[in-house]
Every structure is written in structure tokens, then in C-alpha cells.
Amino acid sequence: MAETETRTRFPIQGVGGASPAGEGAHAFQRGREAAGTAVRKIGAWSEEHPGQMVLAGLALGFVLGKLLIGRPRPVSEEME
């Protein structure tokens, strides 16, 4: 499969100086690179193990559903 490059570059002011804005911009760039690396690794793993990816997605959906939906209310509370 061909890999495409879709990274948008923004000019960063103050990079290279000792200003706090430069440090934040550098941290932002490192985070962006780490996220891109994670996406590529997950994509490669999912191509090699599609069945495990489906199971992982189902498990994640189940856990998120349990956390977000909560417990059903008893019938006595609904009648009031």
C-alpha cells in the first residue's frame, strides 16, 4: 500500500529562543510526531492482525459503553 503524507505545517514563531512560547511549540511538534508514529504503528499492526483488531475494537466499545451509559434506574424510580 502506498503511504501518503498529509501533515500540515504551520509557521512557528519564537522557535529557537528561550521564550516559553518556543518551548510549548516544540512540545506541540513532538506530540504531533508521536501521534503520527502511533497511528502508523497501529495501522501496520491492524493490517497484520485484522481479527485481533476487530476484537480490540469490540472490547473498547464494550468498556466505553459501560463507562458512559451507566447503570439502569430501578423501575420504582421511573414511576415517581
Image (cartoon, rainbow, N blue to C red):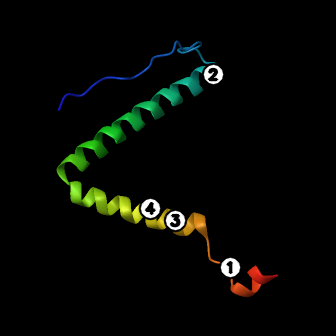
Q: Position of residue 3 (x, y in %)?
A: 24, 28
The dot on residue 61 is 4
Work out whether mark 4 precedes mark 2 in sequence or the reverse, and give the earlier one. Answer: 2
Q: Position of residue 63 (x, y in %)?
A: 47, 66
Q: Do tag 3 and tag 4 residues touch (Cβ < 8 Å)?
A: yes
Residue type (three-letter) at the residue carrying disc 3: Gly
Q: Do tag 1 and tag 2 residues touch (Cβ < 8 Å)?
A: no
Q: Is residue 24 above or below residue 43?
A: above
Q: CA distance from mark 4 to mark 1?
A: 22 Å
Q: Quadrant of residue 41?
A: top left
Work out whether mark 2 precedes mark 3 in sequence or the reverse, and give the earlier one. Answer: 2
Mark in front: 2 vs 3 = 3
Residue type (three-letter) at the residue carrying disc 4: Gly
- Callout 1: helix, strand or loop? loop
Residue indicated by mark 2: 21
Q: Quadrant of residue 62?
A: bottom left
Q: Nearer the viewer, residue 66 or 31?
A: 66
Residue type (three-letter) at the residue carrying disc 2: Ala
The residue under the point 51% across, 25% down is: 26
The residue under the point 40% across, 22% down is: 7
Q: Position of residue 65 (x, y in %)?
A: 52, 65
Q: CA distance from mark 1 to mark 3?
A: 16 Å
Position of residue 1 in the picture relative to residue 42 (left or right): left
Residue indicated by mark 1: 73
**Position of the N terminus by quadrant:** top left
